[in-house]
């Protein structure tokens, strides 16, 4: 499972940030602004996840995703979705890893769908 996914977009960084924020919010994430224009998305309860681990359902299992918004030298905007799989194992073993993988994949699919529907996605590359 990739640790990142890059979305190359033919739109300005602010509109891409807004679209990504909306896509993640529709997936149940609370999205906050991070450093240097990044986004930090969290879903679920850390306390409940630590208590019951992999038995937490997809919406209550604690997941954190980060999105970096950048501009390439050729002027394309890139939204890079990032996650860390190791933490899922600590929070729920093999089931936690599977839940973390599924959350990352669902978030990537939601962002892809939103950017495609808007007609601004030019390339999508798992990393």
Image (cartoon, rainbow, N blue to C red):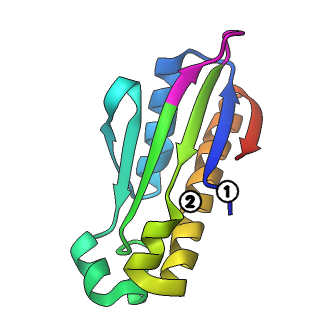
Q: Residue at the location (66% across, 10% down)?
A: 75
Q: Is residue 21 left or right of residue 82?
A: left
The residue at which mark 2 appears reads as 104
Q: Is residue 123 left or right of residue 64?
A: right
Q: Looking at the rendered structure, which numbered label has been put on residue 87?
A: none
Residue 1 percent across, percent down from the top left: 68, 63
Q: Nearer the viewer, mark 2 or mark 1?
A: 1
Q: Residues within 10 Å of mark 2 (few under 14, many from 20)?
A: many
Residue 17 percent across, percent down from the top left: 47, 29
- Quadrant hosting residue 66: top left
**Residue occupying the far left of the picture:** 47
- Quadrant hosting residue 123: top right
Residue 96, above or below 64: below
Tag 2's secondary structure? helix
Residue 114, above or below 70: below
Q: Along the line of sight, which residue is nearer the eye, 116 or 78?
A: 78
Q: Residue at the location (25% across, 86% down)?
A: 51
Q: CA distance from mark 2 to mark 1?
A: 9 Å
Tag 1's secondary structure? loop
Residue 86 percent across, percent down from the top left: 49, 68
Q: Residue at the location (40% across, 77% down)?
A: 90
Q: Earlier in the sequence, mark 2 or mark 1?
A: 1
Q: Residues within 10 Å of mark 1 (few under 14, many from 20)?
A: some
The secondary structure making up most of the magenta span is loop
Residue 117 percent across, percent down from the top left: 68, 36
Contact, mark 2 vs mark 1 (Cβ under 8 Å): yes
Q: Is residue 33 left or right of residue 13?
A: left
Give the residues drawn in magenta, as a range: 69-76
Q: Looking at the rendered structure, which numbered label has been put on residue 2?
A: 1
């Amino acid at each position: 499972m990739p640790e990142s996914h890059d979305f190359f977009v033919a739109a300005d960084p602010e509109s891409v940030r807004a679209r990504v924020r909306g896509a993640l919010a529709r997936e149940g994430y609370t999205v906050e602004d991070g450093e240097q224009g990044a986004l930090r998305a969290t879903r679920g309860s850390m306390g409940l996840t630590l208590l019951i681990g992999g038995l937490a359902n997809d919406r209550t299992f604690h997941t954190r995703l980060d999105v970096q918004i950048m501009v390439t030298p050729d002027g394309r905007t890139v939204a890079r979705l990032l996650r860390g799989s190791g933490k899922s194992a600590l929070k729920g073993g093999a089931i936690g890893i599977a839940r973390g993988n599924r959350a990352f994949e669902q978030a990537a699919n939601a962002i892809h769908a939103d950017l495609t529907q808007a007609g601004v996605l030019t390339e999508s590359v798992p990393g």
